[in-house]
Amino acid sequence: MRATLFGTRGSLATPGPETTRYGGNTSSVEVRSADGAILAIDAGTGIRRLGMQIPPGTARIDILLTHLHMDHIQGLGFFGPLYNPGIDVHIWGPASSTLPLEARLSRYLSPPLFPVHLRDLPRVTCHQIPRPAFDIGPFRVATALVCHPGPTVGFRIEADGGVVTYLSDHEPALGLSDGRWPTSAWISGYDLAAGADLLIHDAQYTDEQYEHCLGWGHSTYRHAFEFAARVGAKKIVPFHHDPSHGDEMLDRLLADAVQRFGPACEVSAGREGMAFEVPPGT
Amino acid sequence: MGHPIQIILTRQLAGYLSVPIFLVDPAGDLLFYNEPAEAILGRRFEETGAMPAAEWGSVFTPVDDGGRPIPPEDLPLMVTLAKRRPAYKRFFIKGLNGARRHLEVACIPISGLQGEFLGAAALFWELAE
């Protein structure tokens, strides 16, 4: 299984000379199995380019949406396979207590915000999550609601002997008492991330930013590293970078965080275009 | 197995409130109680941890205004668990230290986005005798 980052930015796309190395597109990650099955996780602006690299002859693509904040769906209307009558596109995302997923997505994919109606796309099927673990081709997908404002899920994807966990918008540290973590049953996202080979996790804020953004649903590097240590992840990819953090600042943040917090596993700050074999060496 | 996020967030909320709160799962097992609730139960959560329904339910001796025992099925938490709806009642208890307390208790079901029943929260309020 291979995970490739097509969008690593949080909140708002930030193209420009300051973000050329880490990337300016919002969250989107491709997970491809050894036999070529494709999952697109989140539909931030990065999914446009992801869609351009789908091999000819692909008959099905599944898009897994963590939630419907704009930075996670803005690229959806620009995902080429949606308009290809030869490709079945399945969209998995959270419903609210009052609206099904399709109706919630249609608020964006309809005029005046977008010229095309979701219902007019040729072969799109919507599925609501969370639900008990389910299979998509070779992938075993587990979902659970996690700590972030509004219905938001994380994903645990198992295939080819490896585990990828994706928690793009996640504040597991909310409510920690004196910085002490509770037992595992009380940690948001724990079951999804336990023992993951690759943990792609929110690390949007600096410590100083977090003081002003408590409860907004995001993590610091410290939170991400501590969470990774708690769940026993083998490698963490901090991402969902804050729009105000340019390449040089992200370099400094990562170096400083590694020095101060001594992460218990391997760390690679998320950059657009990065690809990871899971498990390593496969 | 981890708790659903709704239960985790309810615990976090309880940790920031001065109102005594007991948090239970669908079977009535006590998952958490906050510091103000420790005074009612007479034990610290750090000492007890989670407790089965039979154990923590026997700590109290609920009686009505006339001192008559209240059947368990008439207690608000049991109503909420059985009928999955809010419930309220005013009654007296004797805690672990034997002190008589006059309480009103409001219980709310914790139901997920799709209506799944995840547990209940019981809010205790002590009244002046």
Image: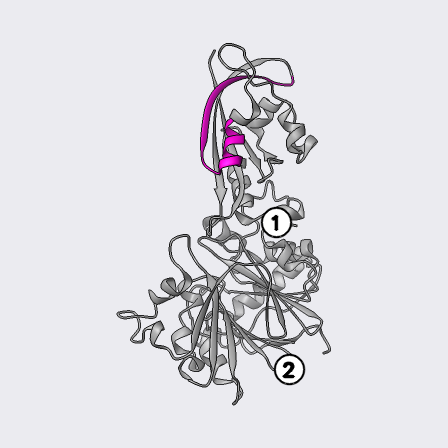
Residue at the right extreme of this rendering: A281
Residue type at the position of mark 2 = Asp
Which residue is labeled 2 in the image?
A: A35
Q: Chain of mark 1?
A: A
Q: Position of residue B29 (x, y in %)?
A: 62, 36
Q: Is residue B49 left or right of residue A101?
A: right
Q: Is residue B50 left or right of residue A48?
A: right
Residue A179 seen: yes
Residue A202 seen: no
Q: Which residues are magenta?
A: B75-96
Q: Secondary structure at mark 1?
A: loop
Dividing the picture into quarters, in which one does residue A100 lie?
Answer: bottom left
Dot placed on the residue nearer the N-terminal end, 2 or 1: 2
Which residue is labeled 1 in the image?
A: A187
Q: Secondary structure at mark 2?
A: loop
Q: Residues within 10 Å of mark 1 (few under 14, many from 20)?
A: many
